[in-house]
Image (cartoon, helix red, strand yellow):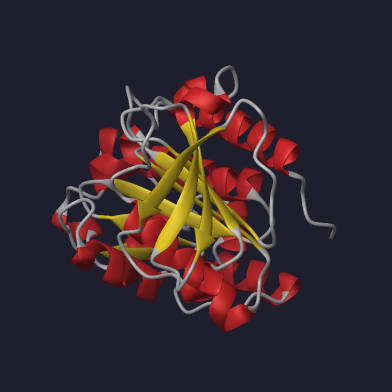
Amino acid sequence: MSEPTLDQVLAQMGDVGQRMARIDAAEGAAGNISVFLAGAIAAPDAFVGQGKLSLPVQAPHLIGGTVVVTGASRRLGDIAAMPEATLCLLQVIGDGTEALIYGAANVRPTSELNTHLAVHNDHVGRRGVRHHAVVHAQPVRLTYLSHIPAYQETFAFNRRLLRWQPETLIEFPEGIGVLPFQMPGSPDQMRVTTDALATHRGVIWARHGIVTRSDAGVGKAGDLVEYAEAAAHYEYLNLQVGERSSGLADAEMRLICERLGIDQKYF
């Protein structure tokens, strides 16, 4: 698969931003998106150089590459129409503790930039990927379920959510990790998220939302949010009617996995 151009990435981020808004996963300025691109990327004319930015975490594996990231207090749904006013381009330089920042004069990266950088740095350094995307969103039902103690443990959470349709297990064969609540933007949040996303494609931040990652493009990372929220919707509906359904049976789930060659541990 060829690496996308910056214009393609900007268009894909705009599409994902609008999709997150449509599924009520990005109210106001909630949520954030970032994409790493290896190599030198020339900033478009609309993205004006704003000097150097000290990064919240060292990212040595991203040196020479570009991170396109949503700005703090910017709406994901506005990316498509106003990319230069909602996004920052960060060209990582030096020893990985600084970046040249491009964008509108008053745009600064999301307060959760540390987590985005750490996750990109881990996958680029450990797996050698040249294109990597991270999406954080706050879908209503998925976030609501993460407030309930019964859904705050990874095994139990996956037993309940993966059972509603085959697509969810296909998209998350390793399951969705569930992490305890951490202060947003904190070093602890960054650390546990980076560790969990080393082995999962998506993780739940308890009482906060979901984070997904993909090296197949930001569109795919957005898809994963939608798949997870669809499963949460089924679970939410089932709770509303008194849990009248048990979803797909364990034997049916195992048959799906056997036929599709999925290695999983939940059924």
Frontmost residue, 153 versus 244? 153
Query: Based on the displayed image, in which of its 4 quarters is residue 73 positioned?
Result: top left
Q: What residue is shown at x 67% (from left), y 33% (from top)?
A: 44
Viewer-proximal residue among 20 and 28:
28
Instruction: Name the one closer to the observer, 152 or 234.
Output: 152
The reply to whether residue 149 is visible in this rendering is yes
Q: Is residue 138 left or right of residue 231?
A: left
Which of 218/5 is in front?
5
Query: Which image quarter is the N terminus in?
Result: bottom right
Farthest residue to the right: give it.
2
Query: In this picture, is 144 found above or below 185?
Result: above
Q: Residue at x 69, y 57 (%)?
A: 40
What residue is shown at x 26% (from left), y 64% (from top)?
Answer: 179
The location of residue 57, given as percent across then percent down, is 33, 66
Count of numbered marks: 0
Q: Decide if residue 263 is in sight here.
A: no
Image x and y of residue 130, in percent? 68, 66
The answer to whether 240 is drawn above or below residue 256 in the figure is: above
Q: Describe residue 151's horizontal placement relative to residue 200 as left or right.
A: left
Residue occupying the point 17% across, 50% down: 148
Instruction: Estimate the x, y position of residue 135 in percent, counting from the top left.
Output: 47, 47
Q: Position of residue 186 (x, y in %)?
A: 19, 59
Considering every residue shown, the one lying at the far top of the view is 81
Q: Quadrant of residue 258?
A: bottom right
